[in-house]
Amino acid sequence: MSQSPEIKKGQVETTGHVWDGDLREYNNPLPRWWLWAFYGTIVFAVVYWILYPAWPYAGTYTKGVETVSFTVKEPNGQEKTVTEHWNSRALFNKDMESSPSALAQKEWLAKVKDMSFEQIAANPDTLNFARSMGHALFGDHCAACHGTGGQGVLSMNPEASYPNLTDDAWIHGSSYEKIVQDITNGIHGNMPAFGALFQGEKRADLAQYVLSLSHQSGVNEEAANRGKALFATCAGCHGATGAGNQMIGAPNLTDQSWDFVDISGAKDYDEKLKLIEGVIANGLNHQMPKFGDRLSPEQIRLLAVYVRQLGGS
């Protein structure tokens, strides 16, 4: 290796290193605009790290100094301004509170706030608004159990089944006020287990009678007649005729609507009998969480209108 001779005019600058006599190392510096752009990205990164969430540390992360402010309505109706560190959730919350669609929604909510349920249902515009917002609320809070269309879910386990809301057969009552109460406070239904009281033939006879109430084909009339006397234990909740009691959420056993056992989907009569015997033996618990601490009173009212409309009421 030797030093290169002096650079002639127009010749590309070299680093001064030469190998094998004519192999030179050229010096081609990066364009100045490219260098300044690169330095700019470094400055931008440092500013971004200061303003926005960036570096993880000790189980959390740097929050940044940039903030997002928006107005929210509290359960008591008062409005307050909330300021949070900038993040996608805060931006979403702001959009939900102050976007044009959110402001239009607030205007409609204020309009229906003091209207009665009957007035909302009688006015096509307010009814459409109730259906639209109720549909969204139902999808967010109810569809996971009751299905996207409110058709309910029936499974082999009665306690993992959820009532059909589209058949107009109401377990707890169909008035707007009752639906609002149930959504607000939740539902806690319980049928005690009678496995120790009714065993063997007695349980089968009682199941036969229960199926006879809804006129199921294949009922053993003799067994059903024996089960009728045993039904006195059930009549305290379901009524002497089995028509149910909405005050305590005891289902009507005389219709063809089954919300906790899949009688209509049973392959034969023996399977229906087995399903009813299982409920008699093991009892039934059905719970619905309360939504009074998640939804505003206005939202609950609109959801009640939507749910009642599902059943055709």
Image (cartoon, rainbow, N blue to C red):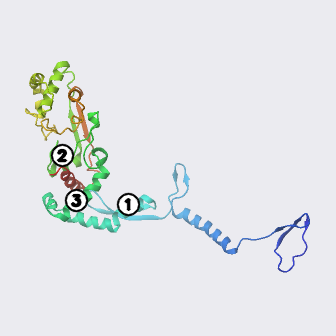
Q: Residues within 10 Å of mark 3 (few under 14, many from 20)?
A: many
Q: Residues within 10 Å of mark 2 (few under 14, many from 20)?
A: some
The residue at which mark 1 appears reads as 93
| Mark carried by residue 130 | 3
The residue at which mark 2 appears reads as 167
Residue at 89% x, 67% y: name it: 22
Q: Within the image, what quadrant is residue 37 found in?
A: bottom right
In three-dimensional space, the C-alpha distance between marks 2 and 3, rounded to whole angstroms, equals 20 Å
- Judged from the image, the secondary structure of the residue bearing numbered disc 3 is helix
Q: Is residue 8 above or below residue 240?
A: below
- Tell me which numbered mark, 3 or 1, is placed earlier along the sequence: 1
Disc 3 or disc 1, which is closer to the eye? 3
In three-dimensional space, the C-alpha distance between marks 3 and 1, rounded to whole angstroms, equals 22 Å
- Judged from the image, the secondary structure of the residue bearing numbered disc 1 is helix
Farthest residue, direction bottom: 9
Q: Nearer the viewer, residue 75 or 44?
A: 44
Do labels 2 and 1 touch, CB within 8 Å? no
